[in-house]
Image (tube, rainbow, N blue to C red):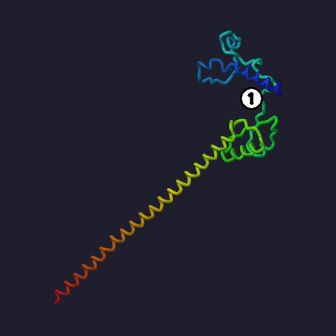
Amino acid sequence: MSNLKALLEYRKHLKGRKPEFIRQDAHKHPSLGRKWRRPRGIQSKMRKNKRGYRASVTIGYRSPKTVRGLHPSGLQSVVVHTLDGLKALDTKTQGATIAHVGMKQKMELLRFAVEKKIPVLNVKDVALFLKKAEEARQLKKEEQEGKRNAKLQKQEELKKVAKTKEAEKKEEAAPPSEEKKKEEVKEVEKILTKKE
């Protein structure tokens, strides 16, 4: 184990000294992209490893074989999507990297990992993350309930407004008919008075 720690430290030291390997002339021509391509030109100074030109990829920059591909903690990173994936892990040599899943699923996986003491590599503080996620979930629930209540209130108000408008229309429609009746009665009386 101490040997593994020493190798991890050595790898960290090597990675600190390792230059960024980018394609020749990538800094001059953005269309080339920065992804590494071995220089093949006959007169390429980079291929010839001339001083003052960018370094090429060589085997000397490689990390020790026993720690190659390991997480800085010394565990092998395993991407986990489901609970079955978490159950299948060997906690001594492997650590869980939670995949890109929904928040509900992620919380479930993290709770299980805490319960079974499985190391999670891509979440720094699991307890803090779970606490914040739960608070965010509660806030979202409250917001949704508030929106739903506001919508219901608005609908009720609209119904009340519609009812009052209908009542006003009926009232407006009713008086003219009474007035007409009164006018008709007056006309009939006039006609009767004329006849007499």
Q: Closer to the camera, 145 or 60? A: 145
Image-based side of 61 in relation to 175, left or right: right
Residue 138, relative to residue 74: is it above or below? below
Residue 21, relative to residue 93: is it above or below? above
| Tally of numbered discs | 1
- Residue 40 visible in rendering: no
Question: What residue lies at 68% left-to-right and 38% top-to-bottom?
Answer: 125
Toward the bottom, the furthest residue is 196
Q: Mark 1 belongs to which amino acid?
A: Pro
Q: Quadrant of the N terminus?
A: top right
Question: What residue lies at 68% left-to-right and 22% top-to-bottom?
Answer: 36
Q: Closer to the camera, 38 or 43? A: 38
Image-based side of 34 in relation to 63, left or right: left
Q: Closer to the camera, 111 or 54? A: 111
Q: Closer to the camera, 120 or 81? A: 120
Residue 4, relative to residue 49: is it above or below? below
Question: What residue lies at 75% left-to-right and 45% top-to-bottom?
Answer: 112
Local packing at callout 1 (Cα closer than 10 Å; few below 14, some 14-19, many 20+) is: some
Circle 1 sits in a helix, a strand or a loop, which is it?
loop
Residue hosting label 1:
72
Residue 184 at x, y percent in the picture: 25, 80
Residue 110 at x, y percent in the picture: 71, 43
